[in-house]
Image (cartoon, grey):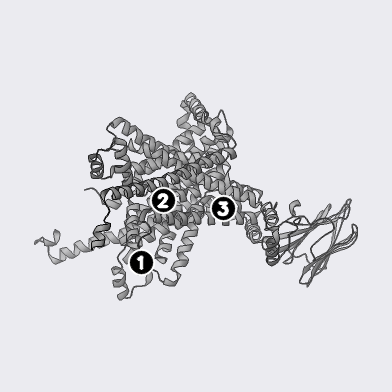
């Protein structure tokens, strides 16, 4: 005891130690920050050097193209409604690709997630396998499958749909299995005690519990898939992206068409975002009575 | 409430309940039926039946067989009788003049060359005539000449479907290989499994060496040279591929982190608790919505006009789109911060900047970091896609390989690399997230973070 009191550090010591500690912490933080900034700067310089046009040049020209498009579109403003009507079927195709692939992906995602959740999987030994399958499905960018399928099936909406559906199945499979983990297993046990098959246990015991969350995630995915299907159209899979590519390759003189497509795409994305936002809010927090 | 209504008789109650059940049952059928009807509509709208006819099985077969095998071409120039051997028919894979793999017995120009296709199949390039001996069928002879086209002699009987003969062309396709004779040249394809020349091309001194010998040589000071040969492989271009992957990762990194850095200060201006001016707050929110609503496709197209193809364009496209998304997420997180911490910091006499630094930032760091890392992974995938459009990174290499429609083994290689890259990023960002946010503690704590993530999570 006497030792302890003798060695007790004075306030001065504590302050010194504390200051040293803070300084060391600050130093490490500073070094980390410096490394990070250096990494960013080096990355930027590399990207700039490997780009066709440099940042400094391009920066002044960012608004040239939008300005040209807008100028031409406003010149031919009278034709804009006509273009919007003309491109509407392409937009519907893009939406169909997104909706169909979300539906198909959600079905497969549900299966994958049920097969990969402990307590629900019919073959517990295969859980890691189904997890890896959904990881791989998720890791493949849509464009990869779409391009390969376009070679085999020819251009059109189906390759895009399959490609997006595969990615969606993987992504939803992961999200759904997280939802499943929070679901109660008691209904499943009850059902199995009365001799229900696996399919019955899942549809009657699990799906009603997780349904709202599933739908909410699927809606979120639908938003993303609209963007994805527009992009895939750009590489030849039909829909509004394909029309955009065509309109752009016509170049000057047809910018009014490009403007109409930009407008359609923008309005659709914002509208779907808002709608699904409201729907998801109702699904997760219940209807506001 | 109706269950406690005394005026209800059991019969009425039963009716009520059965009506409810009917409604539920109808819903149970109506929903899947609606989905089915929609899918049927899509089936018609996408013209799936027409597509089935259009689909090319031939393409599918080449794609699949090419992706795991390679073919060696043995070509005889019919004008001068010279025979050359090359892998995949490319100059980069050509055997040096006068050399050939051991299944080709090369003759001098104008003399006989015998190609052994195994299982009894063999092709002979004679001085004048080309012969293909097919076990169980007979010998197919073809004599090409400038004047008379290709004169083919087949064994008696009807021509099988795997042989096609016309005046100027003979094509034989068997399980062992393929022979095509035209007026100007005769060509034999033999298929092998695997990716040939993956490590070293034919002109490299290390071609055909076993792993043991290579290791031995590497140990005796040739490691640099061996790596150089591998790195500059003309067929598989490992150097370019590595650069392409680095470019893709760079796009994702610059785009995501840049968006985070730009969005954080802007997000303060879009919150109810930090921005007193309503007009500015409203404008900021609409700006974020605009950045998000104009899809990354449009940003990519617009930015590619200004900056040209390359990784910088891709990085900027990701940056602009994600600025909108991050702005929204961060401002939501900022609206949920606890005032007490800020008051506590303020009570010690902190200046406004210090109040933000020590009162606000520590509260939102977990959300901020987890979103940044989450997007870093998802943007690796986006960067591949954007690269395919603007022309940068592994996306560009992939589209180029697909457009040529013959290097499917390269396509398979790139796809494998892309999947590995994305999965690695997924694992890395998950690991870093756990490390940074929970300090690598037990699973209970981890779960709490997961729930919190679910709340603020916007775009997977």
Distance from the alpha carbon under mark 2 to that under mark 1? 23 Å
Element marked by disc 1: helix
Which residue lies at the image location 22% right of the left edge and 40% below the top edge?
B347
- How far apart marks 2 and 3 lie (CA) works out to 27 Å
Q: Which chain hosts label 1? A: A
Q: Which label's residue is closer to the chain start, 2 or 1?
A: 1
Looking at the image, which residue is at 42% across and 56% down?
A: A172
A234 displayed left or right of B365? right
> Residue B169: where, in percent of width, then height?
80, 55
Tell me the chain of label 3: B
Label 2 marks a residue whose chain is A
Element class at badge 2: helix
| Contact check, label 2 and label 3, Cβ < 8 Å | no
Count of picture labels: 3
- Give the residue at mark 2: A221
In the rendered image, which residue does mark 1 sit on? A202
Q: Position of residue A12 (x, y in %)?
A: 28, 47
Q: Answer yes or no: is residue A93 visible.
A: no
Q: Which mark lies nearer to you, 2 or 1?
A: 2
Residue A82 place in picture, x, y as percent = 47, 32
Q: Quadrant of the N terminus of chain A?
A: bottom left
Q: Give the labeled residue for mark 3.
A: B51
In front: B311, or B81?
A: B311
Instruction: Mark yes or no: residue A14 visible.
Output: yes
Q: Is residue B283 above or below residue B169?
A: above
Q: How packed is label 1: few (under 14 Cα within 10 Å), some, or many (20 or more)?
A: some
Tell which of B384 and B449 is nearer to you: B449
- Where is residue A123, by image quadrant? bottom left
Please tell me whether residue B305 is drawn above or below residue B359 in the rendered image: above
**Residues tagged 2 and 1 counted as in contact (Cβ below 8 A):** no
Residue A131, given in percent of the width and then of the height, sits at 45, 63
């Amino acid at each position: 005891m006497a030792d302890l009191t003798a060695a007790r550090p004075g306030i001065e010591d504590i302050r010194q130690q504390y200051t040293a500690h803070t300084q060391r912490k600050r130093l490490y933080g500073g070094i980390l920050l410096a490394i990070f900034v250096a990494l960013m700067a080096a990355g930027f310089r590399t990207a700039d050097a490997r780009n066709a046009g440099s940042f400094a040049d391009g920066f002044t020209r960012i608004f040239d193209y939008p300005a040209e498009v807008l100028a031409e579109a406003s010149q031919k403003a009278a034709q804009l409604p006509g273009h919007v009507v003309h491109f509407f079927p392409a937009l519907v195709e893009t939406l169909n690709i997104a909706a169909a692939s979300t539906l198909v992906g959600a079905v497969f995602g549900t299966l994958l997630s049920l097969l990969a959740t402990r307590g629900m999987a019919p073959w517990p030994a295969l859980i890691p396998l189904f997890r890896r399958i959904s990881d791989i499905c998720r890791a493949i960018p849509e464009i990869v499958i779409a391009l390969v399928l376009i070679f085999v099936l020819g251009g059109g909406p189906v390759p895009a749909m399959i490609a997006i559906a595969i990615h969606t199945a993987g992504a939803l499979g992961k999200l759904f299995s997280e939802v499943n983990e929070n679901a109660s297993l008691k209904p499943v046990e009850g059902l199995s005690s009365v001799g229900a098959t696996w399919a019955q246990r899942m549809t009657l015991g699990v799906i009603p519990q997780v349904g709202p969350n599933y739908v909410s995630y699927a809606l979120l995915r639908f938003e993303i898939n609209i963007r994805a299907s527009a992009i895939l159209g750009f590489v030849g899979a039909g829909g509004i992206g394909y029309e955009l590519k065509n309109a752009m390759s016509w170049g000057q003189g047809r910018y009014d068409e490009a403007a109409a497509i930009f407008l359609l795409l923008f309005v659709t994305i914002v509208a779907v975002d808002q709608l699904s936002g409201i729907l998801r809010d109702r699904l997760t927090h219940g209807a506001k009575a | 409430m109706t269950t406690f209504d005394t005026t209800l008789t059991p019969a009425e109650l039963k009716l009520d309940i059965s009506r409810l059940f009917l409604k539920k049952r109808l819903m149970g059928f109506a929903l899947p039926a609606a989905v089915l009807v929609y899918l049927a509509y899509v089936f018609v709208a996408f013209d799936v039946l027409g597509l089935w006819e259009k689909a090319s099985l031939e393409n599918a077969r080449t794609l699949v067989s090419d992706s795991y095998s390679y073919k060696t071409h043995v070509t005889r120039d019919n004008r001068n009788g010279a025979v050359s051997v090359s892998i995949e028919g490319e100059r980069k894979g050509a055997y040096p003049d006068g050399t050939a793999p051991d299944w080709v017995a090369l003759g001098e120009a104008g003399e006989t060359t015998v190609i052994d296709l195994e299982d009894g199949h063999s092709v002979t390039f004679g001085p004048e005539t080309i012969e293909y001996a097919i076990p169980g069928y007979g010998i197919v002879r073809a004599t090409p000449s400038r004047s008379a086209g290709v004169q083919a002699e087949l064994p008696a009987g009807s021509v099988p479907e795997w042989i096609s003969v016309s005046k100027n062309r003979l094509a034989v396709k068997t399980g062992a290989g393929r022979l095509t004779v035209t007026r100007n040249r005769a060509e034999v394809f033999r298929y092998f499994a695997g990716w040939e020349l993956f490590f070293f091309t034919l002109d490299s001194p290390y071609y055909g060496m076993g792993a043991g010998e290579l290791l031995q040589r590497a140990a005796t000071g040739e490691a640099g040279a061996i790596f150089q040969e591998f790195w500059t492989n003309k067929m598989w271009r490992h150097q370019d591929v590595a650069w392409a992957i680095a470019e893709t990762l760079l796009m994702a990194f610059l785009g995501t982190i840049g968006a985070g850095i730009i969005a954080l200060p802007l997000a303060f201006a879009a919150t109810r608790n930090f921005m007193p001016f309503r007009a500015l707050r409203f404008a900021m929110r609409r700006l974020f919505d605009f950045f998000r609503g104009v899809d990354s496709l449009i940003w990519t197209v617009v930015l590619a006009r200004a900056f040209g193809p390359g990784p910088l364009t891709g990085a900027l496209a990701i940056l602009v789109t994600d600025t909108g998304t991050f702005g929204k997420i961060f401002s939501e997180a900022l609206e949920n911060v606890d005032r007490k911490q800020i008051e506590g910091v303020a009570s010690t006499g902190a200046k406004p900047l210090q109040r933000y630094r020590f009162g606000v930032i520590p509260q939102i760091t977990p959300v901020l970091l987890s979103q940044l890392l989450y997007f870093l992974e998802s943007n690796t995938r986006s960067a591949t896609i954007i690269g395919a459009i603007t022309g940068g990174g592994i996306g560009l290499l992939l589209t180029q390989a697909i457009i040529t429609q013959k290097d499917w083994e390269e396509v398979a290689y790139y796809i494998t690399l892309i999947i590995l890259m994305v999965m690695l990023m997924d694992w890395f960002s998950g690991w870093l997230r756990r490390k940074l946010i929970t300090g690598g503690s037990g699973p209970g704590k981890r779960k709490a973070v997961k729930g919190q993530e679910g709340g603020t999570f916007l775009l997977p």
